[in-house]
Image (tube, grey):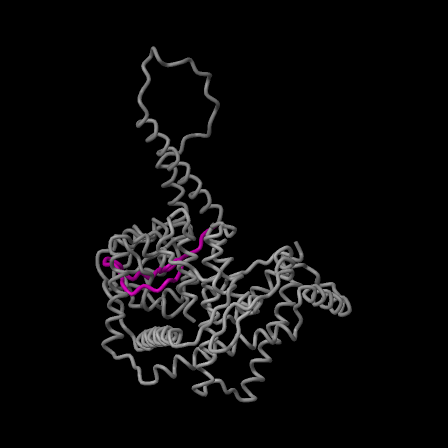
Amino acid sequence: MMKRLLCILLAMMLLTAASFALAEDAVVETTAEDTAAAETEEPVLLVTVNGEEIWSNSNYLQMILSYYLDVAESNGYDITDQGMLDTINWYSLLYTMRSTLLSQKATEFGLDQFTDEEKAQIEAAGKEQWANLIDYYLSSTGAITESSSEDDKAAARADAEAELLQYGYSEEVLVSQYTEETIEKLLTDRMEAYLTSDKTVSDDEVQAYFDDLVKDDQEAYKDDIGTYEFYSKYYGQPSYYTPEGYRGITHILLKVDDELLNTWKDLSARLEEQKSAEQAETIEPAETAADAEPTAEPEPTEEPVTEEMVKAAEQAILDSVSSTVDEIKAKLASGTSFDDLIKEYGQDPGMKDDATRAEGYAVHKDSILWDPAFTEAAMALEKIGDVGDPIVGQNGVHILHYLRDIPGGAVELTDEMKEEFRATLLQEIRAEALNSALDQWMEEANIVYTEAGEDWKLPDITNVTSEEAPAEEASEATEEAANP
């Protein structure tokens, strides 16, 4: 288990800088058996690309292979299946060949030169990655505790480094690999910029991109407020479309005695349970007297909750803050702004933020984010500027203010968003230009496969039956990765 954890942590660290970047949080798992098997295989030359050799034990090729194996396995597919293995082998080799060409062309175009300062920064970052790996390992294994002495910490670090060394990894090896991967990423960036130095993204293209985002969000959210709030509000996923019917609501929250509030919550919940049970009974088909079986005497139960009991508990809460409510109403009548009253009396942390008070909470009649009592009271306000009577909710007593209507439709396209979209579109242009260039360079390159390399080449996969075909996700991922 300890050895497996070390391998996982090491793979996580190495893939952070990997230029193919199929998934930033990918984890490649290598078992001790896998490692032993790989060490016993005789390395063979697979292919030469413009005279540069690629061997089966190439560190780069093996890293790509490990990643693709993880992609397939994580998608639930059998990585012992020969069709899957053939696909993974071929796309790993193809990616390595394209990466080799990228490096060759970078040298040809003079893009491979790095200053001493840049080299020092890369090396320092690699050393930091090594230190982070050791720290993460020590944290995961609990080898160091708060009571550990400095000698204990030093011994634990030495043990961790010795464990990694068993797998051939040291600070020197890891920094070397990190440097290689980082330089490839920098070469990719430089090559993309070189190939698209004359490319720009116009304002019209930015607008069209934004319009497409708006259209997609409108189709997804127009008639589904729950999904809109779940993704855009709860998870914070950007949305470029706002459904119609939202209003901005500010409020004053008054905290109340916990015992009073809990009594009301308990009674309200029990009343709802009773109503649900009664409704279920009316739905079930009634038994005839002949069909009915004798039943035991029912067990004594709690006194049924009535609407009057809930209303009495609610009134007790309102009475407990009545003097404060009267003060608020008096100040409001004398001209004090609701915003100032929030600052003076409000106890909702969300209303402490100036921007939130300026816009209000976004509430819709179909909202799922708010206490139903809050939503109902918010939608009952008739016009902008209205202040409602105090209501009891799950967190206390609320006094709501109808601040504004929130415009539906496309959100405002800000200058910041324009620059973000422009950068996204430019990156798409650059990536496409590099992929097209690599396609052309592959056609023009002097590529010579050995007999072993020929065995790695994948037949036309369009002729493979659905039963024999590799996982769709893995196949798509490997195709994408084959274009660095």
Percent position of residue 239, x then y: 32, 63
- Asked if residue 283 can be seen in this view, the reply is yes
Vertical order, 225 against 359 (above or below): above
- Asked if residue 405 can be seen in this view, the reply is no
Instruction: Identify the residue at the far right of this view.
Output: 151
Determine whether, in the image, residue 378 is placed left or right of residue 125: left
Residue 456: say if magenta. Answer: no
Instruction: Identify the residue at the far top of this view.
Output: 290
Residue 240: say if magenta. Answer: yes
Residue range (magenta): 232-257
Percent position of residue 61, x then y: 53, 67
Looking at this view, is 300 or 391 the one in front? 300
Looking at this view, is 251 or 422 the one in front? 422
Percent position of residue 454, x then y: 47, 63
Q: Quadrant of the C terminus?
A: bottom left
Looking at this view, is 237 or 425 the one in front? 425
Looking at this view, is 416 or 101 the one in front? 101
Q: Residue at x 39, y 54 (%)?
A: 472
Q: Residue at x 34, y 27 (%)?
A: 281
Vertical order, 284 against 399 (above or below): above
Percent position of residue 329, x then y: 32, 60
Query: Quadrant of residue 140 in the image?
Result: bottom right
Determine whether, in the image, residue 10 is placed left or right of residue 229: right
Determine whether, in the image, residue 366 is placed left or right of residue 163: left
